[in-house]
Image: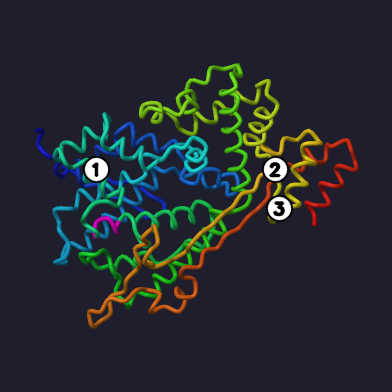
Amino acid sequence: MAKPLGKMHEEKVFKDPVHRYIHVRDELIWRLIGTREFQRLRRIRQLGTTYLTFHGAEHSRFSHSLGVYEITRRIIDIFQEKQTWDPEQRLLVLSAALLHDVGHGPFSHSFEKVFGVDHEEFSREIILGDTEVNEILMQMGDDFPKQVAEVIAKTHPDKLIVSLISSQIDADRMDYLLRDAYFTGVSYGNFDIERILRVMRPTEDGVVIKSSGMHAVEDYIMSRYQMYWQVYFHPVTRSAEVILSKILHRAKELYETRYTFKREITHFKTLFEGNVSLEDYISLDEGTIHFYFQAWMDEEDSILKDLCHRFINRKLFKYREMVSFTDGHLLSGYFDQAGINPKYYLVIDSSSDLPYDFYRPGEKEERLPINLLKPNGEIRELSRESDVVEAISGKRRTDHKLYYPLDLIEQIKDETLKEQIKEILYK
C-alpha cells in the first residue's frame, strides 16, 4: 500500500468572502479538491433556481463544500485540547466535511424528484466507486473510503464526528446560512459563528454547547427559520423550480412516446430510461442542462418549447394562495377548454419546514437535539432552557401555492371562459 498522505510543505490558502480564508495543510484534502468529481461542483449552483430571484445567488456547491471543510477544521482545532476528542479522527472528519455534497446533481432537488435519483447514493458511489476521489482516499487505508461514506450517511458508530457534519447545529448548516445570506444580499442568515464555535464542546454522544452561548444559538435557529421563508421558499424561486420540473417531465414523457428530438439527447437517455450510470451522472452539470434547454426552445413540441423559453428568459408563472379542491377542479376543466394543458400549466407547490425539534420516541426520523452544558456539568436540551426555541420547537410550517401562466390566460379568445378562470384566481 502507498504511504498515507501527510502534511504539505507549505499551507495552501483559498480567499473566501464568508470565512476570509480557507486553510489547507493536509495533502489528502488538497488532492481531493483537485479531483474531477470535486471540481464538477464548481458547475453546480448551491441554490438551484434562486439566482432568478436573488441575482447574486450564483455561488457553487464547490465554495460551500470548502466552507463546510473550513468550519469543521476550526472546530477540530478548538477540540484538540479536549480529552473527549480523538485526534486520530481528524482527517476522517475533514474528508467527510469536504465531500458531504459531492454527489449533488444539477438543480439538485427538482432533478432528483423527476428522475428518482438520490444525491446521497451518488455521493456514496463517488466515494466508494472507480473514481479519482476513491483512489486518493484509499491511500489512507483500505477501510478509509467506507468510513468517510458512513460519516456522511450518519451510520458511523462515532456519534461525535457524525454530529459535526449532520445535526441541528453542524458545519454544513452554519456555512450554507452564512454563505447564502451573503450571496443573496439578505441579513436574515447572519449569526455569531465565532461565538458558537468557541462554546462548542465534544462529548461521546455528540457536540454540546456551553450554556453561556445559548443566546448565540437562539440567534442561529431564528436565522435558519427566516432564511427558509424569505429565501429558500421564496415563491418566485419556487415558480422557476415548477417550470424546471415540468420541462424535465415533458422531455421524459416525449422520449417515452418515441418523439424525435431535433438534437440527440445523449446526456438524458439513461436518466429517462432509469438506469443512469455513475459516469453519466458525473458528466451532468448545470451548463449541460442549460445547453439542452436552449436547444429545446426550437423543438416542434409546443409545451416543451414554451416551458424552456420561460425558464431561459425568466418568464415565470404567477402564483396565489391555494384554492379549494372544487375551484381547482373547475380551473383544470377551464384550462382544458382553453387548450392550456393543466398538467403542465396549473401546478400546486408545497413548502414545509421544521425549524427545530428534539427527538420524539416513535418517530421515523431521529433529530439530534441541541444540548446545552450547564456549569454544574448537567446536560439540558435547548428548548427546555430557551423560551425562544421552545416557542417554535416541533412546529412545522407549511405553505401551499397555485402556479399558473397569466400571459396564456390573457390570450384566451373566449371572453366568458377567460372571466371564469380569472374569477377563481382573483377571489
Q: Secondary structure at mark 3?
A: helix
Closer to the eye: label 3 or 2: 3
Callout 3–callout 1 Cβ contact below 8 Å: no
Label 3, label 2: how many angstroms apart (C-alpha)?
A: 13 Å
User: For the N terminus, which image quadrant?
Assistant: top left
Labelled pair 3, 2 in contact (Cβ < 8 Å):
no
Which residue corresponds to mark 3?
Answer: 325
Nearer to the camera, 230 or 29: 230
Could you say which is closer to the camera, residue 201 or residue 271?
271
Taking the spot 82% from the left edge, 41% from the top edge, the residue there is 410
Q: Amino acid at mark 1?
A: Ile
Q: Where is residue 221 shown, x and y percent of the image?
A: 44, 67
Q: Residue at x 36, y 60 (%)?
A: 366
In the rendered view, does 28 fall on the left or right side of 321?
left
Numbered label attached to residue 346:
2
Q: Nearer the viewer, mark 3 or mark 1?
A: 3
Numbered disc in front, either 1 or 2:
2
- Magenta span: 160-164
Query: Does residue 156 belong to the magenta stretch?
Result: no
Picture quadrant where residue 375 is located? bottom left
Q: Residue furthest right?
A: 415
Picture coordinates of residue 237 (x, y %)? Answer: 59, 48
- Please give the label number shown on residue 395: none
Q: Residue at x 24, y 56 (%)?
A: 161
Task: Give percent across and percent down for residue 382.
Answer: 37, 73
